[in-house]
Amino acid sequence: MNKKYRSTRLSLGAVAASLLMAACGNKAEPGTAPAANAASAPASSRATGAPISVVSVVAKQHNFDVALEAIGTVTPLSSVDVKPQINSVVTQVHVKEGQFVKAGALLFTLDARPDLANVAKVRAQLAKDQAVLDDAQRQLTRSRELLAKNFISQGALDTSQAQVDSQMANLAADRAALDAAQLALSYNSVRASGAGRLGAVNVYPGTAVQANVTALVTITQLDPINISFSLPQSNLNAVLEGLTSGGAVVNATLPDAKIQLKGRLQFVDNAVDAATGTVKVKARFDNADAKLWPGAFVKVALTAQTLQDAVVIPTAAIIQSTRGSIVYVVDKGNAVLKPVKVVASQGEDSAVTGIAAGNKVVLEGRQNLRPDSPVVERTPGAAGPVRATASATPAASVASAPP
């Protein structure tokens, strides 16, 4: 009996010791939390409905311009090398390099003495022939009077008439020669064929020049001016529609000054470049203040299409998923997943379908969202939430609530 009683006491003591050790092992120290609970805190906070801080923007509805962007080169409408039309010597230079001139402005004067002498010679010949004609006409009048009195024959009258006709022809030839001599004389005054800006002046007084060989100066037209650029063949139909509709709007941005200028489509080439698969186009711009300079590179955007009353949101709010493009819309304090279709993108904005104008689309914090997650909105740049939705309770309030 004693032995059996001692065995029973030992068994009960072992069970009590095991229970005591288990109770001590489960007791946590004050102020500490198990690692497993800390690791599962975000999941548990979502499970308990803690709101996620986000920034939202309102989807707007307006006309959305779809532009084709390219790098263009500024090209003048005309750039003319001024050359003399006669062999001569420069006597005067009336302009300076870089000067703006109007059409017809006097640029250079050449040595006109040989042409002046030729004009004087032709004028003298004209006067001589005019005197001979006057005498022939007097002889013709006298012959008619004599024929009326039967003093001369009809043949003598015809001879006088032939002399008058011959002298009139000589006189006409003299007038043509005078016009030619005066034209040659006018070539000694070299004038601007059009308005523009002068380049470098290549001659000085005393310089001998050759007809149609020596370049005196270059005149470049700056106002208006063209910008040439190339677009892919896939955009050819849109470009042609813009040309036939009166010239699509083309915006040009200067890289340094960040100035945007507006022009219109003026020309589309009649063939696609087989080597590059692009088509050359030109747009014309007013350039009274000479902001566009020939040869400069500029960024151009051709407005190929305008979407009427499109729903526009920031492109950054769109999430690319395996199911396509999606956005999160804030609805009654929850993030609702909405599939969208991107119709067109331009700059930082995109025109989409699938949501309505006025919807609040999540822009910041969307990477933390799941469908129907509770959210709290904050202002852009704020460190934490500043306004809770009606169905969400801030986590700080939950933590400080009395037990």
Image (cartoon, rainbow, N blue to C red):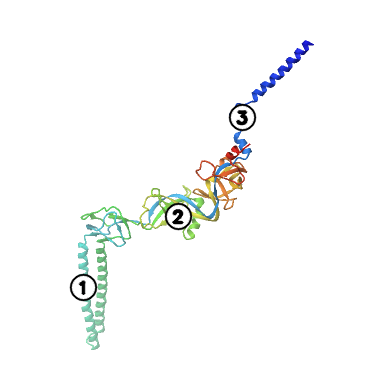
- Give the camera-side residue of 113 and 148: 113
Choose mark 3 or mark 2, whichever is in front: 3
Could you say where residue 216 lies in the image, as x and y percent from the top left?
27, 55
SS for dot 1: helix
| Residue 163 vertical placement versus 212 (above, below) | below
Choose mark 2 or mark 1, whichever is in front: 2
Callout 1 amino acid: Ala
Could you say where residue 41 lies in the image, as x and y percent from the top left?
60, 34
Taking the image as shown, residue 206 lies to the left or right of residue 324, namely left
Report which residue position mark 1 lands on. Answer: 127
SS for dot 2: strand
Whichever of labels 3 and 2 marks the residue nearer the N terminus, that label is: 3
Taking the image as shown, residue 3 lies to the left or right of residue 260, namely right
Quadrant of the rendered image containing residue 93: bottom left
Report which residue position mark 2 lands on. Answer: 250
Callout 3 amino acid: Ala
Locate the N terminus by quadrant: top right
Report which residue position mark 3 lands on. Answer: 36
Residue at (59, 31) in percent of width and height:
38
| Cβ atoms under marks 3 and 2 closer than 8 Å | no
Q: What is the spatial separation of the Cα atoms under label 3 and label 1, in whole angstroms?
A: 123 Å
